[in-house]
Amino acid sequence: MRITVSIPERPDAWIAGLRRELPQADIEAWQPGAAPADHAVVWAPSQQFIDEQPALRGIFNIGAGVDALLKLRVPASTRIVRLDDAGMSVQMAEYVCHALIRHFRELDGYQADAGEGRWSFRKPRLRRDFPVGIMGLGVLGQRVAKAVAQFEFPVNGWSRSPKQIEGIRCFAGEAGLDEFLAASRVLVCLLPLTPDTRHILRRETLSKLLPGGYVINVARGGHLAEDELIPLLDEGRLAGATLDVFEVEPLPPEHPFWRHPKITVTPHASARTLRDESIAQIVAKIRAVEAGTDFDALPGVVDANRGY
Ligand code: NAP
Ligand code: GLV
């Protein structure tokens, strides 16, 4: 079995880990003209890579989001498999709960007071006034929803197909979107980026949140109509935003998001790919398909028509 690897950062560490787990396989970094492989392990490969590897059975993405891969022309016979958690959901739960609680408990205000040696309490706010809406109830969204519910915030969730999840008020599809937004004050985006979800965070939708709306975008920069956010904050229609992902990454130094007092920026760090966990998951899947398991039986197989 031949495996080709196209990963921009530290490909050698990935190759060493894959070789350790699959000593019988021929595993090499891809380069133009490389021999045809059976499987690929990738992050954001080029169209040339895909064009030169038409016989791939599986492309194993080292992230959860496959928007970069689905921009490419991939042969219908090649299946794309994304990471299925692999240590990301707990990181995402930590990040979102931190951003939510920092906002809800006004910790930035206390920090500013501390800087001036001021001992002053803020009036306690009520959880029932801060219902949290999670867009996307997949692997990451469900874990985040449950973590937020543990802190006794009311939690709403929105997905494409209807769901029933204990403790979460679930909404689905286009028809359920307005009601979901109107019932939510803090909005967390954990959707895949697809033609249906691009710019789903825009003036029209964000204006439907409860007053004092707060946005946490941890999915993709393309979900947010970036030009529409600062006016909503400056008008007081939104109270603030925590943004981990951006249309252009790295976020350019001159971008106004860096310096806006109501925006917190992190560098696409909310849920990092963990190499060892990811290699273990990918290797288990490669072993399974090599032993005859159908790709469709694997968790995380992408439906290219659906876009995730
Ligand atoms: P997932 O398991 O595929 O879940 C996607 C969820 O979104 C599903 O609940 C799906 O609905 C819902 N959805 C998709 N299209 C929709 C639409 N048009 N309307 C309503 N709901 C829709 O994905 P995941 O593993 O949770 O990951 C989600 C995303 O997080 C990834 O695609 C990636 O972009 C992002 N991410 C970011 C980071 C970071 O560091 N910032 C790290 C990892 C992932 P159904 O349940 O009905 O299918
Ligand atoms: C990171 O953004 C991922 O999609 O895994």
Image (cartoon, rainbow, N blue to C red):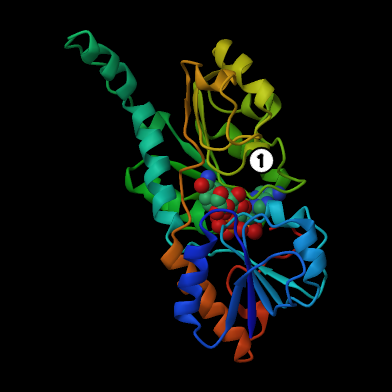
The residue at label 1 has a CB less than 8 Å from ligand 1: yes
Q: Residue 272: image x %, image y %?
A: 46, 51
Going by the image, does 3 lie left or right of 17? Answer: right
- Please tell me which residue is depicted at 56% across the width and 61% down the height of the picture: 62
Going by the image, does 279 lie left or right of 206? Answer: left
308 versus 94 height, above or below: below
- Tell me the crowding category of disc 1: few under 14, some 14 to 19, or many 20 or more residues within 10 angstroms, Cα based: some
- Please tell me which residue is depicted at 62% across the width and 88% down the height of the picture: 290
Task: Locate the C terminus by quadrant.
Answer: bottom right
- Please tell me which residue is depicted at 54% across the width and 53% down the height of the picture: 9
Q: Nearer the viewer, residue 219 or 149?
A: 219
Going by the image, does 127 lie left or right of 24? Answer: left
Q: Residue 127: image x %, image y %?
A: 36, 33
Q: Residue 189: image x %, image y %?
A: 56, 41
Say if residue 136 shows up in the picture.
Answer: no
Give the structural element (helix, strand or loop) at label 1: helix
182 versus 37 height, above or below: above
220 versus 82 height, above or below: above
Say if residue 69 shows up in the picture.
Answer: yes
Q: Nearer the viewer, residue 186 or 93?
A: 93
Q: Nearer the viewer, residue 94 or 286?
A: 286
- Please tell me which residue is depicted at 38% across the width and 27% down the height of the picture: 103
Going by the image, does 288 lie left or right of 279? Answer: right
Q: How many marks?
A: 1
Mark 1 lies on residue: 177
- What's under tag 1, amino acid-wise? Leu
Task: Locate the N terminus by quadrant.
Answer: bottom right
